Structures are given as structure tokens and as C-alpha cells.
């Protein structure tokens, strides 16, 4: 039987290059602290070994700050939650080991969380909350999926990418155009100043699946050809190039997402993950929502990219289901739900 005591969860996220800790009390976020790792910018992508070492340096200060900001002491905690996967193994290992050690020393239950499921459940941090069943396009640096969400912890994959993820496409094409890392937000900003005047082809992929590697090659070949006659082509056209690339990535995503909504006769439609911060995608979803009478759900910017608050809210639903794990849990780079 549930007691009157508040359920207070310390959640830890360390799946990629953000070290984050959050305190969630009865499903409400009291704090959500994120330490990013700027060092990867120099390398044009996340270097797994460096990410893992940076998590080791960041994890104690991040957890400490989350507790202080929430004004919660260790003896008030009900459980420790962590991201088990998917993600980079070395990065996950830091969060998993830290959570296990803390749970052991404080004699608290442990809750393992799937990172993708957590991106989807970020919609339950604030209002308005989607009604079940809803569709969620989960788009990040590592994943691109259309999910049918039947309940908090019951999700079915309807489609996924056969090669690169949408965020990876933004980042890799940005790198080809000489932009910094991560290129997604930079392309988004420059696209606002440009026009989508260059045509990049849309890949033909089966069912509700996606492909982005052809677009990357398409952009590369196009630029190689243009640079032959004008070496400054990229610099002179960067805003229009960004607008064109963004428009194509958004149309690839939206065409399949619309098909999923029609095929399943679902009008509760959400997006989640780092790429859901993209203004082009957010606008396209609003426009389609108005046209097709969908209820659309877009997360607050702070909950689009990786954060521990989404791990905490997922852990809260698992806590209510008595879904705990043992000290024998291990990180899983390809963890499935
Ligand atoms: O969810 P996330 O923080 O980490 C993963 O789980 O991968 O997503 C990071 C990805 C990166 O590829 C980044 O370029 C992309 O999200 N991203 C964006 C924007 N903000 C972040 N892509 C396009 N437009 C944005 N505004
Ligand atoms: Zn993520």
C-alpha cells in the first residue's frame, strides 16, 4: 500500500556527453542540473573516451548541486534512478556505477531507465500532457523512431532509421559545410536567415522507416561540383544551404510521421529528443496539426536535449509499478524497451 510519504527520486543521466542529475518529488521536478562537455567541439563529434572521463569529473558536483538546489538531503530520498542505455558504454558505465554505489550505501531501491522511453515521457513533466495512445517522433543524435505510446511504459516502434539518425544527419552535413559541432542548432539558426532554394532529393524507404545517409552524399556531391567553379560557394550561400538542408530533413521526417498518424488514425501527436528543438520541425508539426486537427505536443526546450528530469519522471512511473532492478544490473549500449 502507498504511504503518505513523498516519493523523492534522484535521477542520473550520462548516456552521451551531458552529465545530468535531477530531483523529482511525486512526479514534479525540483531541480535539473546539466553539465555539458564543450571539449568535443574541437573534434567535430563526441569522443567516447573523453566523454567517459568528463562524466567521472562532473558526476559528484552535478548530483551535489541537484540535491542542494532542490533542498533535499540524502536521507529524504526514496530511490536512485539512472540511464541504463542506449548510449555510449563508457559514459553509461559512470552513471550506472555511481547510482549503484549510492543505492548500496543508502540502502535505497534502484530504478533502471531506457533513455528513449525517457525522451518520450518528458511530455509528462509539464502540461499539457498527451492522452494515450499517442504517436511520438523521437529524434536525437543517436535515434530516429516513430513510436506508438499505449501507456507510460508500453511503447511500440512503428518505424526507425535504416542508417543515420536525424540529429546525426544535421551534424554530419554541418561538418561537410564547415560548421561547428553539434551543427543541428547552428543550421537551425542560419536557416532562419536563408531560403530553401537548393533541391536535395528525398530517399525512398519502405514503410515508416527513414534514411539520411543518401542526403549526406547528395549534399557532399552538390558542394564538390559547385566549389569547382566557385571556391567560396559554401561561405557565400551558407544560409540558403542551411535552409535547404533543414527543409529536406524536416520533410523526410514529417512525410513518414503524417503517414503513421493516418495509418493508425491517431490525432494525439508528439515530438521528442534533441532534434525536437529544431524550429523548422516545430513549425511543420504546428502546421500539420492545424491542417489535420491533431493535438500536438512539443517539449519545452530544456527537456528536448539530454537531461535527468526525463529520467526521473520515467523512474517515478516505474516506482509506482514497483519496477526496481538489482545491484547486478549493467549498462547496455543497445538497451531495448
Ligand atoms: O537528445 P540529444 O541531446 O542527445 C542524444 O540522445 O543524441 O540530441 C542531440 C542532437 C544533436 O545531433 C544535435 O545536433 C541535435 O540534437 N539538435 C538539433 C537542434 N538542437 C539539438 N538539431 C536541429 N536543430 C536544433 N535546434
Ligand atoms: Zn537523448
Image: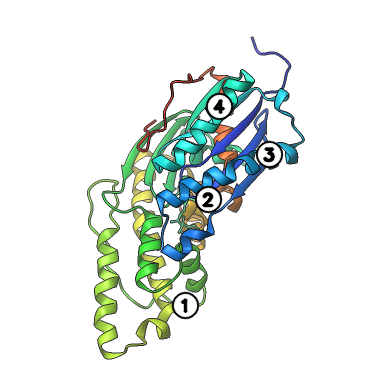
Q: Earlier in the sequence, mark 3 or mark 4?
A: 3
Q: Which one is nearer the viewer's eye here, 9 or 47?
A: 47
Colour mapping: rainbow
Q: Nearer the viewer, mark 2 or mark 3?
A: 3
| Residue underneath mark 2 | 305
Labelled disc at residue 194:
1
Quadrant position of residue 154: top left
Q: Residues within 10 Å of mark 4 (few under 14, many from 20)?
A: some
Q: Are marks 3 and 1 in contact (CB under 8 Å)?
A: no
Q: Is residue 281 above or below residue 232?
A: above
Q: Earlier in the sequence, mark 2 or mark 4?
A: 4
Q: Position of residue 166 (x, y in %)?
A: 38, 55
Q: Earlier in the sequence, mark 1 or mark 2?
A: 1
How far apart marks 3 and 1 lie (CA) works out to 44 Å
Q: What residue sits 57% from the left and 47% below the top? A: 303
How far apart marks 3 and 4 lie (CA) works out to 15 Å
Mark 2: C-beta under 8 Å from nearest atom of ligand 1 = yes
Give the secondary structure at mark 4: helix
Q: Nearer the viewer, mark 3 or mark 1?
A: 3
Q: Is residue 214 above or below residue 197?
A: above
Q: Nearer the viewer, mark 4 or mark 1?
A: 4
Amino acid at each position: 500500500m502507498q504511504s503518505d510519504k513523498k516519493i523523492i527520486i534522484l535521477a542520473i543521466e550520462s548516456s552521451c556527453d551531458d552529465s545530468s542529475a535531477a530531483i523529482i518529488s511525486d512526479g514534479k521536478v525540483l531541480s535539473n542540473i546539466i553539465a555539458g562537455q564543450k571539449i568535443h567541439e574541437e573534434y567535430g563529434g563526441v569522443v567516447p573516451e573523453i566523454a567517459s572521463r568528463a562524466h567521472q569529473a562532473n558526476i559528484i558536483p552535478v548530483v551535489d548541486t541537484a540535491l542542494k538546489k532542490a533542498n533535499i538531503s540524502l536521507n529524504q530520498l526514496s530511490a536512485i534512478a539512472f540511464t541504463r542505455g542506449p548510449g555510449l558504454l563508457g559514459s553509461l558505465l559512470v552513471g550506472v556505477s555511481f547510482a549503484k554505489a549510492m543505492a548500496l550505501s543508502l540502502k535505497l531501491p534502484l530504478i533502471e531507465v531506457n533513455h528513449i522511453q525517457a525522451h518520450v515521457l518528458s511530455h509528462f513533466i509539464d502540461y499539457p500532457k498527451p492522452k494515450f495512445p499517442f504517436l511520438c517522433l523521437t529524434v536525437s543524435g543517436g535515434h530516429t523512431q516513430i513510436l506508438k505510446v499505449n501507456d507510460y511504459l508500453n511503447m511500440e516502434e512503428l518505424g526507425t532509421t535504416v542508417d543515420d539518425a536525424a540529429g546525426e544527419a544535421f551534424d554530419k552535413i554541418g561538418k561537410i559545410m564547415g560548421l561547428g559541432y553539434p551543427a543541428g542548432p547552428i543550421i537551425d539558426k542560419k536557416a532562419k536567415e536563408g531560403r530553401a532554394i537548393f533541391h536535395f532529393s528525398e530517399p525512398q524507404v519502405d514503410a515508416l522507416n527513414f534514411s539520411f545517409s543518401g542526403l549526406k552524399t547528395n549534399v557532399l556531391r552538390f558542394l564538390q561540383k559547385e566549389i569547382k567553379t566557385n571556391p567560396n560557394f559554401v561561405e557565400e550561400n551558407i544560409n540558403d544551404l542551411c535552409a535547404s538542408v533543414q527543409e529536406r530533413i524536416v520533410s523526410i521526417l514529417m512525410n513518414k510521421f503524417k503517414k503513421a498518424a493516418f495509418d493508425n488514425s491517431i490525432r494525439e501527436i508528439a515530438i521528442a529528443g534533441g532534434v525536437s528543438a529544431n524550429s523548422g520541425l516545430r513549425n511543420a508539426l504546428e502546421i500539420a496539426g492545424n491542417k489535420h486537427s491533431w493535438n500536438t505536443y512539443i517539449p519545452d526546450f530544456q527537456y528536448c536535449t539530454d537531461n535527468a528530469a526525463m529520467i526521473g519522471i520515467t523512474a517515478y512511473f516505474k516506482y509506482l509499478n514497483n519496477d526496481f532492478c538489482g545491484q547486478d544490473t549493467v549498462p547496455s549500449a543497445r538497451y531495448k524497451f
